[in-house]
Image (cartoon, helix red, strand yellow):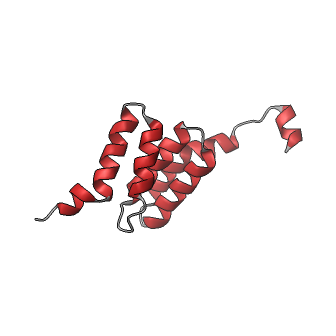
Amino acid sequence: LDLQWAREGWYALWQRGYSVTAAGKLESARSLLMRAIEDPDHDPHVQATLGNVLSKLGDRAGAARAFGAAHRAYPQNPEYAKAWLAPFVADDQSPKPESAAGDA
């Protein structure tokens, strides 16, 4: 079994990105994961991990795009999409303060 791809491609970048995410180094994680998604053969979970990192960095729009890309790449399992997007759906359905509602 040849696992050369795992040492050189998106998988190695994802592993490093995941590790630095756990260490709280979110900017480094973002950089590594952005490089990983450039590989056309990357796994949808790379996008999901990127979505989590972007969400923690406060980039909700970028996170939603990453989660959406993960779902589009793996539509046969809608449970993943539900789990990935749940924080965004919950936030969008939460009550808004009166002043914010009038500003929209």
Name the one closer to the observer, 70 or 15: 15
Q: From the viewer's perspective, tell me whether residue 85 is left or right of residue 11.
A: right
The N terminus - image quarter: bottom left
Name the one closer to the observer, 34 or 68: 34
Picture residue at 29% right of the left edge, 59% below the top: 9
Q: Is residue 75 visible?
A: no
Classify 18 as above or below 35. Answer: above
Q: Position of residue 32 (x, y in %)?
A: 40, 48
Picture residue at 30% right of the left edge, 47% below the top: 15
Classify 37 as above or below 59. Answer: below
Q: From the viewer's perspective, tell me whether residue 85 is left or right of residue 97.
A: left
Picture residue at 23% right of the left edge, 62% below the top: 5
Picture residue at 42% right of the left edge, 51% below the top: 33
Name the one closer to the observer, 6 or 87: 6
Q: From the viewer's perspective, tell me whether residue 2 is left or right of residue 90.
A: left
Number of numbered tags placed on the structure image? 0
Q: From the viewer's perspective, tell me whether residue 14 is left or right of residue 67.
A: left
Q: Position of residue 13 (x, y in %)?
A: 33, 51
Q: Position of residue 20 (x, y in %)?
A: 36, 37
Q: Is residue 69 visible?
A: yes
Q: Can you tell which quarter of the image residue 55 is in?
A: top right
Q: Position of residue 26 (x, y in %)?
A: 46, 37
Classify 18 as above or below 62. Answer: above
